[in-house]
Image (tube, rainbow, N blue to C red):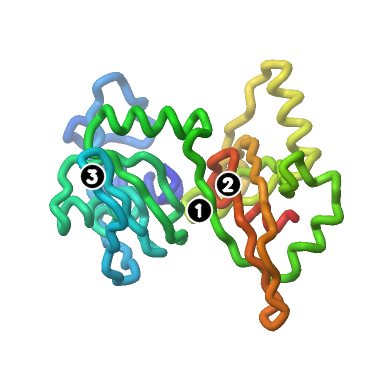
Amino acid sequence: FHLYSKDYFINAIKEGKILINEKQTSEDYILKDNDFLTHLTTRKENPIIFQKLEIIYEDNDYLVVDKPSSWPVHICGAYNFNTLQRILMDEYNYKDIKILHRLDKQTSGIVIFAKNTNSAELFRNKLHTDDVQKIYFARVKGDFSTILNKKELMNENGRIVCKKYLKPLDKAKGIHTDVDDKEVEEFLNKKNKKEEISNNIEDKDKEVFEPKYAETEFEFLFYDKTSNTSVVKCYPKTGRTHQIRIHLRCL
Protein backbone atom coordinates (compact mmCIF):
# COMPACT_ATOMS: atom_id res chain seq x y z
CA PHE A 1 0.00 0.00 0.00
CA HIS A 2 1.97 2.95 -1.34
CA LEU A 3 -0.37 5.78 -0.38
CA TYR A 4 0.83 6.13 3.24
CA SER A 5 4.15 5.74 5.04
CA LYS A 6 5.11 2.83 7.32
CA ASP A 7 4.81 5.14 10.37
CA TYR A 8 1.22 5.97 9.41
CA PHE A 9 0.25 2.28 9.35
CA ILE A 10 1.96 1.57 12.71
CA ASN A 11 0.05 4.44 14.35
CA ALA A 12 -3.22 3.39 12.68
CA ILE A 13 -2.83 -0.14 14.05
CA LYS A 14 -2.15 1.20 17.57
CA GLU A 15 -5.17 3.54 17.35
CA GLY A 16 -7.45 0.71 16.24
CA LYS A 17 -8.03 2.11 12.75
CA ILE A 18 -6.71 -1.09 11.17
CA LEU A 19 -8.52 -4.24 12.33
CA ILE A 20 -8.14 -7.95 11.60
CA ASN A 21 -11.43 -9.86 11.65
CA GLU A 22 -13.01 -6.79 13.30
CA LYS A 23 -10.60 -6.96 16.28
CA GLN A 24 -7.63 -4.77 17.24
CA THR A 25 -4.27 -6.21 16.24
CA SER A 26 -0.54 -5.51 16.61
CA GLU A 27 2.01 -4.40 14.03
CA ASP A 28 3.87 -7.74 14.11
CA TYR A 29 0.75 -9.80 13.30
CA ILE A 30 1.23 -12.00 10.19
CA LEU A 31 -1.77 -12.20 7.87
CA LYS A 32 -3.34 -15.64 7.37
CA ASP A 33 -5.63 -17.02 4.67
CA ASN A 34 -9.19 -15.63 4.89
CA ASP A 35 -8.24 -12.84 7.31
CA PHE A 36 -10.58 -9.85 6.91
CA LEU A 37 -8.64 -6.57 7.04
CA THR A 38 -10.47 -3.31 7.73
CA HIS A 39 -8.91 0.15 7.39
CA LEU A 40 -10.97 2.99 8.87
CA THR A 41 -10.07 6.31 7.27
CA THR A 42 -11.59 9.57 6.11
CA ARG A 43 -11.71 9.76 2.31
CA LYS A 44 -11.61 13.13 0.61
CA GLU A 45 -12.41 13.01 -3.09
CA ASN A 46 -9.89 14.90 -5.22
CA PRO A 47 -11.39 17.46 -7.62
CA ILE A 48 -11.33 17.18 -11.42
CA ILE A 49 -11.86 19.85 -14.09
CA PHE A 50 -15.59 20.34 -14.73
CA GLN A 51 -16.35 19.64 -18.37
CA LYS A 52 -19.35 18.21 -20.23
CA LEU A 53 -18.57 14.70 -21.40
CA GLU A 54 -18.75 14.21 -25.17
CA ILE A 55 -20.03 10.86 -26.46
CA ILE A 56 -18.43 10.38 -29.89
CA TYR A 57 -20.04 7.09 -30.95
CA GLU A 58 -22.38 4.44 -29.60
CA ASP A 59 -23.94 1.18 -30.80
CA ASN A 60 -25.14 -2.05 -29.18
CA ASP A 61 -21.57 -3.21 -28.47
CA TYR A 62 -19.38 -0.14 -27.82
CA LEU A 63 -19.41 3.31 -26.26
CA VAL A 64 -16.74 5.83 -27.36
CA VAL A 65 -16.16 9.00 -25.32
CA ASP A 66 -13.73 11.94 -25.31
CA LYS A 67 -12.07 11.85 -21.88
CA PRO A 68 -11.23 15.31 -20.50
CA SER A 69 -7.85 15.97 -18.92
CA SER A 70 -7.65 15.42 -15.12
CA TRP A 71 -10.24 12.60 -15.16
CA PRO A 72 -9.00 9.14 -14.09
CA VAL A 73 -10.51 6.38 -16.23
CA HIS A 74 -11.39 4.10 -13.29
CA ILE A 75 -11.47 4.01 -9.49
CA CYS A 76 -7.93 4.36 -8.14
CA GLY A 77 -6.12 5.83 -5.14
CA ALA A 78 -7.92 8.95 -3.95
CA TYR A 79 -10.51 8.83 -6.76
CA ASN A 80 -13.81 7.02 -6.42
CA PHE A 81 -16.74 9.09 -7.71
CA ASN A 82 -14.70 11.56 -9.82
CA THR A 83 -13.72 8.99 -12.47
CA LEU A 84 -14.82 8.53 -16.07
CA GLN A 85 -16.37 5.12 -15.40
CA ARG A 86 -18.34 6.24 -12.31
CA ILE A 87 -19.59 9.43 -14.00
CA LEU A 88 -20.85 7.37 -16.96
CA MET A 89 -22.54 4.95 -14.56
CA ASP A 90 -23.99 7.50 -12.12
CA GLU A 91 -24.85 10.43 -14.37
CA TYR A 92 -25.33 8.85 -17.82
CA ASN A 93 -26.95 5.57 -16.67
CA TYR A 94 -24.44 3.16 -18.31
CA LYS A 95 -24.54 0.47 -15.62
CA ASP A 96 -22.52 -2.41 -17.07
CA ILE A 97 -19.73 -0.94 -19.21
CA LYS A 98 -16.36 -2.64 -19.39
CA ILE A 99 -13.06 -0.73 -19.59
CA LEU A 100 -11.05 -1.83 -22.66
CA HIS A 101 -7.99 0.38 -22.22
CA ARG A 102 -6.89 3.37 -20.16
CA LEU A 103 -5.38 6.82 -20.49
CA ASP A 104 -3.35 8.65 -17.86
CA LYS A 105 -5.36 10.99 -15.66
CA GLN A 106 -3.71 14.07 -17.19
CA THR A 107 -4.20 12.90 -20.80
CA SER A 108 -7.28 13.80 -22.81
CA GLY A 109 -8.47 11.60 -25.67
CA ILE A 110 -10.66 8.76 -26.88
CA VAL A 111 -11.63 5.99 -24.46
CA ILE A 112 -13.64 2.97 -25.65
CA PHE A 113 -15.93 0.90 -23.42
CA ALA A 114 -17.62 -2.40 -24.25
CA LYS A 115 -21.27 -3.02 -23.39
CA ASN A 116 -20.98 -6.81 -23.19
CA THR A 117 -18.39 -9.53 -22.54
CA ASN A 118 -18.12 -10.75 -26.17
CA SER A 119 -17.39 -7.25 -27.50
CA ALA A 120 -14.82 -6.69 -24.75
CA GLU A 121 -12.98 -9.92 -25.58
CA LEU A 122 -12.99 -9.17 -29.33
CA PHE A 123 -11.55 -5.69 -28.86
CA ARG A 124 -8.86 -6.77 -26.37
CA ASN A 125 -7.71 -9.53 -28.71
CA LYS A 126 -7.35 -7.01 -31.55
CA LEU A 127 -5.44 -4.63 -29.25
CA HIS A 128 -2.96 -7.39 -28.34
CA THR A 129 -2.39 -8.39 -31.99
CA ASP A 130 -1.90 -4.76 -33.16
CA ASP A 131 -5.08 -4.85 -35.31
CA VAL A 132 -6.11 -1.91 -33.13
CA GLN A 133 -3.44 0.66 -32.24
CA LYS A 134 -3.26 3.62 -29.89
CA ILE A 135 -1.96 6.83 -31.48
CA TYR A 136 -1.18 10.00 -29.52
CA PHE A 137 -0.41 13.54 -30.67
CA ALA A 138 2.10 15.47 -28.59
CA ARG A 139 3.37 19.04 -28.72
CA VAL A 140 7.01 19.34 -27.69
CA LYS A 141 9.48 22.15 -27.19
CA GLY A 142 12.01 22.75 -29.98
CA ASP A 143 12.40 21.50 -33.55
CA PHE A 144 11.88 17.72 -33.53
CA SER A 145 13.00 17.43 -37.16
CA THR A 146 16.66 17.86 -36.08
CA ILE A 147 16.52 14.31 -34.65
CA LEU A 148 15.70 12.92 -38.11
CA ASN A 149 19.42 13.17 -38.96
CA LYS A 150 20.16 10.42 -36.42
CA LYS A 151 19.68 7.41 -38.69
CA GLU A 152 20.57 4.99 -35.89
CA LEU A 153 17.30 5.98 -34.16
CA MET A 154 15.14 5.45 -37.26
CA ASN A 155 13.31 2.25 -38.21
CA GLU A 156 12.25 0.94 -41.63
CA ASN A 157 9.00 2.97 -41.45
CA GLY A 158 10.95 6.23 -41.15
CA ARG A 159 9.93 6.72 -37.53
CA ILE A 160 12.22 7.66 -34.67
CA VAL A 161 12.31 4.85 -32.10
CA CYS A 162 13.06 5.18 -28.39
CA LYS A 163 13.67 2.01 -26.36
CA LYS A 164 14.22 2.93 -22.73
CA TYR A 165 13.51 0.99 -19.56
CA LEU A 166 11.31 2.85 -17.06
CA LYS A 167 10.54 2.58 -13.35
CA PRO A 168 8.62 4.55 -10.71
CA LEU A 169 10.61 6.88 -8.48
CA ASP A 170 7.64 7.29 -6.15
CA LYS A 171 4.61 5.09 -6.83
CA ALA A 172 2.33 6.96 -4.43
CA LYS A 173 2.92 10.27 -6.23
CA GLY A 174 2.96 8.63 -9.67
CA ILE A 175 6.45 9.88 -10.55
CA HIS A 176 8.23 7.72 -13.15
CA THR A 177 11.60 8.06 -14.85
CA ASP A 178 13.96 6.35 -17.31
CA VAL A 179 16.64 3.92 -16.13
CA ASP A 180 20.30 4.31 -17.05
CA ASP A 181 22.00 1.60 -19.13
CA LYS A 182 24.18 0.38 -16.26
CA GLU A 183 21.21 -0.34 -14.00
CA VAL A 184 19.39 -2.09 -16.86
CA GLU A 185 22.44 -4.25 -17.55
CA GLU A 186 22.69 -5.26 -13.88
CA PHE A 187 18.98 -6.05 -13.77
CA LEU A 188 19.13 -8.20 -16.94
CA ASN A 189 22.21 -10.07 -15.66
CA LYS A 190 20.39 -10.92 -12.43
CA LYS A 191 17.30 -11.93 -14.37
CA ASN A 192 19.30 -14.15 -16.73
CA LYS A 193 20.92 -15.85 -13.75
CA LYS A 194 17.46 -16.28 -12.26
CA GLU A 195 18.51 -14.47 -9.12
CA GLU A 196 15.84 -12.78 -7.06
CA ILE A 197 15.42 -9.08 -7.75
CA SER A 198 15.61 -7.46 -4.34
CA ASN A 199 12.42 -5.71 -3.34
CA ASN A 200 13.63 -4.55 0.08
CA ILE A 201 13.03 -1.13 1.61
CA GLU A 202 15.84 1.38 1.11
CA ASP A 203 17.15 3.66 3.84
CA LYS A 204 14.68 6.33 2.79
CA ASP A 205 11.78 3.88 3.15
CA LYS A 206 11.24 3.68 -0.61
CA GLU A 207 10.85 0.43 -2.48
CA VAL A 208 13.34 -0.70 -5.11
CA PHE A 209 11.34 -1.18 -8.31
CA GLU A 210 12.60 -3.33 -11.16
CA PRO A 211 12.95 -1.63 -14.57
CA LYS A 212 10.27 -2.33 -17.20
CA TYR A 213 11.02 -2.32 -20.94
CA ALA A 214 9.26 0.43 -22.91
CA GLU A 215 9.25 1.30 -26.61
CA THR A 216 7.69 4.20 -28.52
CA GLU A 217 7.84 5.25 -32.19
CA PHE A 218 7.59 8.94 -33.16
CA GLU A 219 6.65 10.57 -36.46
CA PHE A 220 7.45 14.26 -37.05
CA LEU A 221 4.46 16.28 -38.34
CA PHE A 222 5.41 19.97 -38.28
CA TYR A 223 7.42 22.67 -36.54
CA ASP A 224 6.07 26.11 -35.56
CA LYS A 225 8.87 28.67 -35.51
CA THR A 226 6.84 31.33 -33.65
CA SER A 227 6.28 29.19 -30.55
CA ASN A 228 9.38 27.01 -31.10
CA THR A 229 7.27 23.86 -30.71
CA SER A 230 6.79 20.72 -32.79
CA VAL A 231 3.84 18.37 -33.15
CA VAL A 232 4.67 14.66 -33.29
CA LYS A 233 2.61 11.52 -33.73
CA CYS A 234 3.35 8.88 -31.08
CA TYR A 235 2.93 5.12 -31.43
CA PRO A 236 3.46 3.39 -28.05
CA LYS A 237 4.44 -0.26 -28.50
CA THR A 238 4.24 -0.89 -24.74
CA GLY A 239 1.91 0.61 -22.15
CA ARG A 240 4.10 1.96 -19.35
CA THR A 241 2.98 4.92 -17.24
CA HIS A 242 4.17 8.27 -18.67
CA GLN A 243 6.32 6.48 -21.28
CA ILE A 244 5.60 8.99 -24.08
CA ARG A 245 6.62 11.99 -21.96
CA ILE A 246 9.72 10.23 -20.64
CA HIS A 247 10.81 8.96 -24.07
CA LEU A 248 10.39 12.40 -25.61
CA ARG A 249 12.54 13.84 -22.83
CA CYS A 250 15.19 11.18 -23.48
CA LEU A 251 15.26 12.10 -27.19
Q: Which residue is mark 2?
A: 168
* SS of the residue under disc 1: loop
Residue farthest to the top?
Answer: 194
Q: Is residue 140 above or below residue 36?
A: below
Which residue is denoted by mark 3 in the rendering? 59
Q: Do callouts 2 and 1 mark residues in contact (Cβ within 8 Å)?
A: yes
Q: Nearer the viewer, residue 177 or 101?
A: 101
**On residue 174, which mark appears?**
1
Q: For the C terminus, give its image quadrant.
A: bottom right
First along the sequence among labels 3 and 2: 3
Mark 2 Cα within 10 Å, few/some/many (few <14, many 20+)? many
**Residue 25: quarter of image:** top left
Question: Mark 3 is on which residue type?
Answer: Asp
Give the amino acid type for the residue marked by disc 1 in the picture. Gly
Image point (63%, 65%), residue name? 231
Label 3 secondary element: loop
Up-down relation of residue 30 to residue 144 (above or below): above
Pointers 3 and 2 in contact (CB under 8 A)? no
Inspect the image, locate mark 2, and give the three-letter code of the amino acid beneath it: Pro
Direction from residue 58 to residue 157 in the image, left or right: right
Q: Residue at x 39, y 31 (%)?
A: 28
- Residue 41 spot, x, y in % from top left: 25, 52
Coordinates of residue 193 in the picture (x, y in percent): 73, 16
